Amino acid sequence: MAISRPHSRLLLLLHAIFALTTQAAARGGHDRSGTDDRNLGSFYRNLLQDKPRITEEMVRGYMSNHELENAIHAFGSRCPNISRIYSIGKSVNNFPLWVIEISDKAGQKEAEPAFKFIGNVHGDEPVGREVLMLLANWLCDNYLKDPLATLIVENVHLHILPTMNPDGFALRWRGNANNIDLNRDFPDQFFSINNDINYRQPETKAIMNWVNQERFTASASLHGGALVANYPWDGTRDKSKQYYGCPDDKTFQYMASVYSQSHHNMSLSKEFEGGITNGAFWYPIYGGMQDWNYIHGGCFELTLEISDNKWPKAAELPVIWEHNRMSMLNLVASLVKSGIHGRIFAADTGQPIPGSVMIKGVDSKVNASMTFGDYHRIIAPGEKYEVIASMEGFRPKATRTVLLEGESVNLDFILDPNGPDGKMKLLRNHCGCRCGDDKLFHMQGPNLGLYLLVSFVLLILYLLFKRKSASRLLTYRYSPRRPIAV
């Protein structure tokens, strides 16, 4: 059918506009520099023309959503001793978002770090879902055979979400069923574009609830369209394209380099020095998932571009897997092979407490768990750090300088409770009596000597109890050599 000249001009114009957005296609969305954020709303989360033509030939060899679902459950049946299968929610079209948890104690709470991989954030980037299933099966096949597989299974809780966007995959376009870019749908630190929860997509809500329920130490999402490890910040305050590092910039550079240097050829990139990039320096995006994870979940997340071609032929998938296998394994293993780990205890009770840990000079903190008081602080090796533990109602405690070299450092903290003037808070015993009640201890005349004697005995008993509690804590070990801050 012939196309009129005005229509042909319109098509050429649309093609030109689409071409300008190609660079931003890897991480999703459009360049919004110069836009008025007060009017952004949900409009800029719609992808409009971003619907590439994906042929049947391109799709051949990739698992359909139902085939992927069957593969996930088949994995759970094949490897029940080190896995569990669960769903974190459903997509717009009601497809379950299945997760594989891999651990020697899957489903149980442990004083161990947790890592999550997320694939297929964008519907037209399916390599991640295939590679993540290959990773899960490799760990199952090599547990107790390969040292790295065994280290991960026994020391990390690894959660794998092969597809965050099953609807987009089925529709063969970038966004979800509502044509929303899920990597633009999270609350943003600089602009209030996504603060209206009525516009937030169910897939986004599922991830946010998941992060709030699980205490992930680190994370990575798998994308296609480039070959680089991307780290925060993803945007800038003034929307300019420039290097914009977060408080843990050195740590993120280290994590990205672990991935890039372990990759077959990512570190050899001529476009990205060392195969890594700061997101805002590459091109700014807003409402991205990795910045939200770091700010609101305390989760150190990378955005990994693992294939120059978004939808390569299925025959290329085994090669892409081999190129990324050691990178994925080393990134997860780095949680226990480096960094600072430990637990926080209350000196008076000997019980673990959910305090927080900071590195002096780094404006971010990592929270310890409610159950075990354990914390896991990723930090770049090769430097000296001062570690500070704190919690409301307790005196903060800092270590002497800790040199973090090629191995992880294990460090427990025992915090002393305090009161308004630095005195110990009055505690109730199991009967509910206030041990510091003025009337109970008000003595006069002949009773003064008895009062002093009782006070002395109580002081001795308290000191003995405190010493016994501290001694009991010293028996806990992550490893044979553990520095203890007391």
Image (spheres, rainbow, N blue to C red):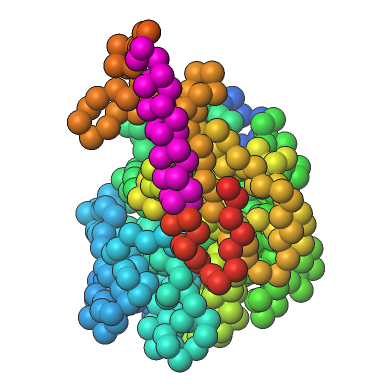
Which residue occupies the foreground of this view, 208 or 299?
A: 299
- Give the residue at the far bottom of this rendering: 145
Q: Which residues are magenta?
A: 446-470
- Residue 452 placement: quadrant: top left
The magenta stretch spans residue 455: yes
Could you tell me which quadrant the N terminus lies in? bottom left
Give the mark count: 0
| Residue 123 visible (yes or no) | no
Residue 468 screen position, x and y as percent: 44, 51
Which residue occupies the foreground of this view, 355 or 245?
A: 355
Residue 303 screen position, x and y as percent: 57, 57
Q: Which residue is rendered at x = 70% and y = 77% of the image?
A: 265
Q: Which residue is rendered at x = 27% and y = 70% of the image?
A: 84
Side of 31 relative to 455 (left or right) = right
Which residue occupies the foreground of this view, 289 or 390?
A: 390
Residue 118 screen position, x and y as percent: 44, 61
Q: Main secondary structure of the magenta part?
A: helix
The magenta stretch spans residue 434: no
- Give the residue at the far left of this rendering: 431
Residue 406 screen position, x and y as percent: 71, 70
Vertically, is 105 above or below 256? below
Side of 453 relative to 303 (left or right) = left
Q: Which residue is rendered at x = 58% and y = 36% of the image?
A: 396
Vertically, is 150 above or below 215? below
- Residue 252 placement: quadrant: bottom right
Q: Which residue is rendered at x = 74% and y = 59% of the image?
A: 403
| Residue 335 visible (yes or no) | yes
Which residue occupies the foreground of this view, 118 or 449?
A: 449
Side of 360 relative to 306 (left or right) = right
- Give the residue at the far front of this rendering: 446
